[in-house]
Image (cartoon, grey):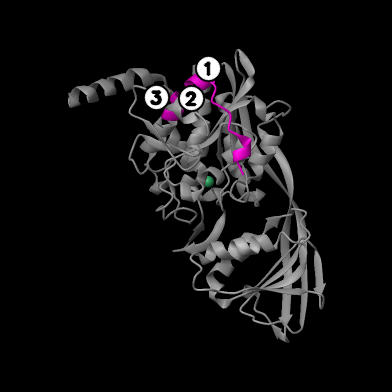
Amino acid sequence: MKQLTILFVACASVTFAQPVNKHITEANVARVIKTLAADDMMGRSATRPEHIDKAAAFIEKEFKTIGLIPLQGLKGFRQEFKKDMIAPQTLEVVINGQKIAPENTLLVSENTTINLTKHAGVIVIPYDTAIKNTRQYLLSKAFNLTRDTATAFVLVAPEFKENFKELKGYFGKRFTSGRKTNKIFVLGVTSVLNYAVTATQKIEPITMSNVAGMIPGKTKPDEYVVFSGHYDHIGIRPAIAGDSIANGADDDASGTTAVIELARYFKKIKNNNRTLIFVAFTAEEIGGYGSRYFSEQLNPDQVVAMFNIEMIGKPSKWGQNSAFITGYERSDFGEILQKNLKGTPFQFHPDPYPQQNLFYRSDNATLARLGVPAHTISTDEIDIDKFYHTVNDEVETLNMANITATIRAIALSSQSIVAGTETPKRIDKSTVR
Ligand SMILES: [Zn+2]
């Protein structure tokens, strides 16, 4: 019985899956992902146009070769937008007559010059052994403080030394938000009697671009199905063993590769009654600015489903031929996908890491907030992935067969939605924060 079942499944999947096997090949998957995760892409930081442009140009070229057309109102595949970035130039903090070492100071302000000798308040962030996660504690305290407009010193207890570095990274280079806050974070100082703070910052406009193309629908062109991944990553990091480029092979060159290969597949099989939009987002890693801009350029009510793909480079906790879907319970998207996979060995599971908040940690959340059944598909064992956001997220750590199988499964699982015969339930906006 067992053997017979296996045989039957194997046969069924082969005949059923032939076009996906023909058009989505491991060779092409490897070519695309190796290009995107190569050292010459310099870690694809969205705030370094001179680095990320190379990746954008490559994706554009692939879209052109495949035969996609630009989105409505655009001449090319780039969907450009500008953001103003705050670039700190100088900062000198003297407290009680002592100059504070630069690594122990951080200014969070949108002013270009600061000269402060009086009228600053003092806020203390003390350490307590009861704090379980000092990183999360400090980051959330700091984030909340930067919401209020008062000018103040924030004295951070010396026990947060390691977390303070991260705080500096988090607020170091960021976009303007219009928040009128002036906070001077200082590590290791316990009282402020007198002070002098001088600082200069530059506001630099940065141009960023999503790369997007489409295949118009045959009978329901006004209904959109979106396939997305983010092509930006975290750029250059402090070197480990001489390597400083965070290649982001899994995160998210793998998802971007899926978007490209799905475009290639659907362009070949020509069975989409709905319009298919393929988009590689920028600036996911620094706050999801690319997907936000994208969501503002179309009517979200016309988007019937969003397949966002993040980190499919390594087999999931259940092994090969499986993946999980974030926000599974929020719509019947997952059930539809699984139904379309009947007769194949592939299995979609609900997100097994709810405590990680993955539903909110990728570009799907932006469209879900607008009611779109927008979910992220992933295979990553995020709780134990030691390569995540390190310079070691390299192509060599990936499993090309896993990526290829997952892309094929996504192609098959989407067929009734692409054909326009099934429509997932909308996500209840009021439940998405
Ligand atoms: Zn990612």
Q: Which residue is mark 1?
A: 419
Q: CA distance from mark 1 to mark 3?
A: 15 Å
Q: Are marks 3 and 2 in contact (CB under 8 Å)?
A: no
Label 2 CB, ligand 1: below 8 Å?
Answer: no
Q: Which residue is mark 2?
A: 414
Quadrant housing residue 344: top left
- Identify the mark at residue 149; answer none if there is no mark: none
Q: Amino acid at mark 3?
A: Leu
Given residues 405 and 324, the one toward you in this image is 324
Count of residue discs: 3
**In this orientation, does residue 347 appear?**
yes
Quarter residue 211 falls in: top right
Query: In the image, what residue occupies the spot 80% across and 63% down?
Result: 112
Q: Earlier in the sequence, mark 3 or mark 2?
A: 3
List x then y, in percent, for residue 343.
34, 22
Mark 1 vs 2: CB contact within 8 A: no
Q: Residue at x 37, y 42 (%)?
A: 316
Q: Earlier in the sequence, mark 1 or mark 3?
A: 3
> Considering the numbered disc 1 on the image, is that residue within a helix, a strand or a loop?
helix
Of helix, strand and loop, which one carries label 3? loop
Look at the image and give the residue range highlighted in magenta. Answer: 408-433
